[in-house]
Amino acid sequence: MTRLRRPYWRLVYLVPLTFLALFYFYPLLAILDIGLRPEGWLDLSAFLRLLSSDYYVGVFLFTVYQAALSTVLTLLLALPCAFVFSRYRFAGKSLLLALATLPFVLPTVVVAMAFMSLIGRRGLLNDLLMTLFSLDYSPIQLERTLAIVIIAHVFYNFAIALRIMTSYWSTQGIAAEEAARVLGADEWALWRDIRLPLIQPALLSAGALVFMFAFTSFGVVLILGGIRFATLEVQIYYQTINLFNLPLAAALSLLQIGAMFALMILYTHLQRSAQFAIGSGKAAAKPAKNARERALVWGVVIFIFALLFTPLLALVARSALKDGALDLSNYLALAESSRGSLLFIAPIASVANSLRFALMSTCMALVIGLIASFMIVGRGPLARFVDPLLMLPLATSAVTLGFGFIVALDEPPLNLRSSWLIIPISHTLVAFPFVVRSVLPSLRAIPPSTREAAQVLGAGPYDLLRTIDLPLVSRGIAVGATFAFTVSMGEFGASLFVAQRESVTIPVVIYRLIGDPGLASYRQALAMSVILLLVCALGFVMIERLRVAGVGEF
Amino acid sequence: MKGAFLMYARSVVVILLLVQIVLTVSSQDNDRVVVVTHDSFAASESVLEAFEAQTGLTVEILRAGDAGAMVNQSILSVNNPLGDVLYGIDNSFLSRALEAEIFLPYESPQLQFVAESFIPDVNHAVTPVNYGDVCVNYVIAYFEANEIELPASLADLTLSEYEGLLVVQNPATSSPGLAFLLATIAVFGTEGDYTFLDYWADLRSNDVLVVDGWTEAYFGEFSAPGRDLGSRPLVVSYASSPPAEALFSENPEDGPFTGALVGDDMCFRQVEYAGILVNARNPQGARQFVDFMLSQAFQADLPLNMFVFPVREDIPLPGIFAELAAIPEQPAALAPADIEANREDWIQAWSEVMLR
């Protein structure tokens, strides 16, 4: 019976492939075609210009360098934290884990301001140090340096590494570790021989995502790095928008996508050989029992607080304090449709718009991401290439793809370029790779024997999914959903043409307010950012609730 | 397998067609006018509603990113345009759009109310709607407290008393940044003993600060009252910023707090135009909308919505604008064609001087 149904069952794999083909490859190829065949025949002189110019080679090398540095630092910092999170139980753990995702949603321009008020020349930390040591200069001078770019990348991407590793580690039993300990292994040997090999799939998964984000970094490099630093993404934007040099932009886009594709092939290869299945087990978290373990837990909590939450608190303080006193007038002003302007809806109304799109995108990303994950773990010949392909939307410049939508999706039945549908679609493109990366490590770790045993006992594909796969990857799904939700909530969509009021989301309002002269609208923009944080935090709690209600804690 | 695939492909097409029907059923082409504009667009709802009521047209606004993104996307979609009217293209991007021939010429009867100087010599391919000047803004209290004279020309900014006071934007990424660079090119030229590059080298020696965008400069580095981060009392911004700064401060009556330096050859004027797109589905509605943009109602609505000035001279400015906005009599100017032809080289040369 199962065998007969299988071909039809596999048709579901066409869902992610069709989605990618229609909304990624088709628009991308359309815009690259315009760039590379301006006169109707293939013109590759832009590539020659790239390769022969020291400047662009330099941009490429810098892009790789800062991304590698950001990734290594993020993983190094997140690894011990993930270990502590998966081993010890403590009050507020899941809340802390969820809130760690918050930085991801904030617009760069807001984060830059928060950073400046914390570690800028006239920021809080410098004030403190100057008073403490009676200095007459600012000891911390990070503005417009590579260091602050890297710090910001860690700030943004830390949660990706932390959450993917924690969710994976929590499903791995500690039997092997206990056996090794009995045999006399010391702490160092445990890390080298057991823990690192065990966490490697999640480490690679998180590393790939972090690298990709740092590689395509735009706002952080522009705003915090200043004019001396430029990534490929910055150059693509500049060539496309300011100079309208589509051939060069196309060459740069292809270079960026090609580099990422090569990296993903390498990653897929490593990932396949890295699987180190010891068998799934119950999450081994237990309370910290001695002073050393308690110090470990406290250390991690304080570190996360310092890295992730102090900038957020600085933001909250700036939005709600005036001359040292609480002043919520900015928040109250957000409820009014100021100036009665078209498209300038009451900022608070944008919350409903954002939530609607985030909900749609999260559902679409979950469906597409889950199907894609099953396709990748399947043994089909395609699986090896599908995985790298799925990540390409993250490697593609938003402005390139936005222009692709304009030229490709302009005729029935795909006349979507100015419809609101393009918003959840473009959010889903960026969101579903997170679902894949979050789900895949745990899905791969399910031993085939478990499924085979169930099949022998007469379980159909649906039973397998419901009783084995979904419960075992539920943490991964929750993490993926959290990121999908966050990506959608934070997405600005600068290069989309969308009409009317329903398109005005929270980030659009923030950019709009922050672009107006006048301190009041600037402070309202900060207040709106805090509301964005609150709405996201609520969303995270809901997602966690749904997971526990849906499949149960195990 | 093959049959199943065909079935699948068919269902995809059916779904897409259904989506299409839902999307297009809403309105007919000839009773709506679609306006493509940039993200900064704002207009009072009541003003637009009056236009809709009077003409029977439905106005639809498409936001299209910043001005550059909007123009480029309109050029790419010239055969199947996104809308009927493009509004918000300025003189720094005008040439690019004219070369691509994306506009249908139209001479609005309302142009009789507009000063000749605003109307470009392009056979009415575009119609001027509003303008704004990019000028250096200053913190009034700083110059009063330190008893320093205000700079009287761009050249003055290189003097030692203004050392470390000025913050500007990167012309590669910022529209006012580019406008200010263009002002320096118009004033100092690209040839001779002292070119704009020499000027920028001097500004650099005088510790000018370059940041990425207007927001970072105006709220992050500028030291107008109420900011705790900024420490520089001179910033490149707009001539309309001082009234807006006062209007949106917590105590407008205490203003003005800032001023704009509007001396001759100190500002660069950005004029924004509207044009009817070639292949527009509703060219008649587009013409009506262009006329409407030059009507008293729309023109008078501009300053408080977008902090720009109406091109019609017979429009009274709203209170605080009339009081605090200074309009430069002789802004620096460059031909749009020159800007388009040299933009890349100028920015490149500038980068080399500022980064060397």
Image: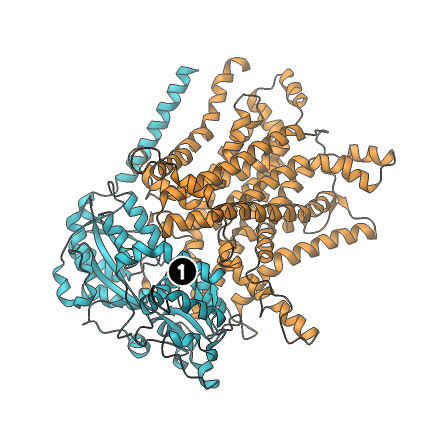
Chain colours: A orange, B cyan
> Taking B199 as reference, is B42 left or right?
left
Mark 1 lies on residue: B171
Name the quadrant containing residue A213: top right
* Placement of the C terminus of chain A among the 4 image quadrants: top right
* Placement of the N terminus of chain A among the 4 image quadrants: top right
Residue closest to the eye, A45 or A59: A45
Q: Position of residue A36 (x, y in %)?
A: 36, 37
Q: Position of residue A172 (x, y in %)?
A: 71, 35
Visible residue check, residue B138: yes
Residue furthest front as drawn: B193
Residue closest to the eye, A123 or A378: A123
Residue B222 lies, with reference to residue A531, above or below; the image says below
Q: How many marks?
A: 1
> Taking B78 as reference, is A551 left or right?
right
Q: Position of residue A109 (x, y in %)?
A: 49, 58
Residue closest to the eye, B220 or A260: A260
Visible residue check, residue A541: no
Residue B80 lies, with reference to residue B43, above or below; the image says above
Q: Residue at x 62, y 48 (%)?
A: A69
Q: Residue at x 14, y 50 (%)?
A: B284
Q: Residues within 10 Å of mark 1 (few under 14, many from 20)?
A: many
Name the quadrant containing residue A544: top right
Determine the chain carrying the residue at label 1.
B
Residue type at mark 1?
Pro
Q: Position of residue A498 (x, y in %)?
A: 34, 47
> Taking A538 as reference, is A179 left or right?
right
Residue A57 lies, with reference to residue B131, above or below; the image says above
Label 1 SS: loop
